[in-house]
Amino acid sequence: MFAEQFSSVFYDSYDGVQSRNVMKNSGLSDTDDITPTDITVDLIDNSIRHLKHGKACGPDDLGAEHLLNAHPSLVIHLKILFNMILRHSYVPANFGLGTIIPLVKDKSAPLSDPSNYRAITLIPVICKVSENVILSYVMML
């Protein structure tokens, strides 16, 4: 029942080709390209600090608390990762993974009705940070 209801929100991002052109899909023109010097430790640290606490973990079993309580050198490693993603226009296949979870909309309505559910997708927390970094950068333009 859930498979039929949520099949429309399912997207298989793995099609045998594990790379995506980040710039082409970002909507930025060639003159607006994000360069590795634009992704700073402060930008990544702010993105981690703005993650919501107490949320469910994604398929990697890591939550925001893991990043918030990690050693500060993690931010430097994330900077290197994000810069490599931009430099090589290659997004790791695990960034496209997600777990679709059905949530009840109205607890007083029949729970057997599939339209009484909405889908949320749990994605890797590192992917959330990278999305926040890119969004923050684009908002600064």
Image (tube, rainbow, N blue to C red):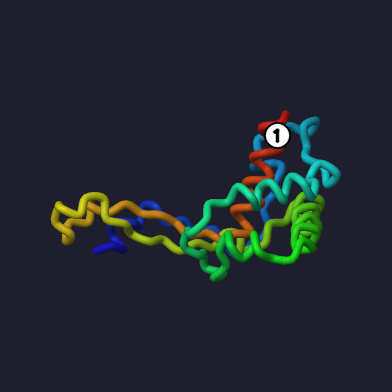
> Residue sitting at 68 percent across and 43 percent down?
134
Percent coordinates x, y for residue 109 in the rendering: 15, 52
Crowding at label 1, few (<14), some or many (≥20) Cα neighbours within 10 Å? few
> Residue sitting at 71 percent across and 38 percent down?
137
Q: Is residue 103 left or right of residue 132?
A: left
On screen, 45 above or below 77? above
**Residue placed under numbered mark 1 in the picture:** 28
Q: Is residue 35 left or right of residue 134?
A: right
Q: Is residue 78 left or right of residue 5?
A: right
Percent coordinates x, y for residue 140 in the rendering: 71, 31
Residue 38 falls in image quadrant:
top right
Q: Which residue is nearer to you in this view: 11 or 80? A: 80
Tag 1: amino acid: Leu
Percent coordinates x, y for residue 115 in the rendering: 22, 51
SS category of the residue bearing label 1: loop
Q: Quadrant of the N terminus?
A: bottom left
> Residue sitting at 41 percent across and 61 percent down?
100
Q: Quadrant of the C terminus?
A: top right
Q: Which residue is nearer to you in this view: 25 or 65? A: 65
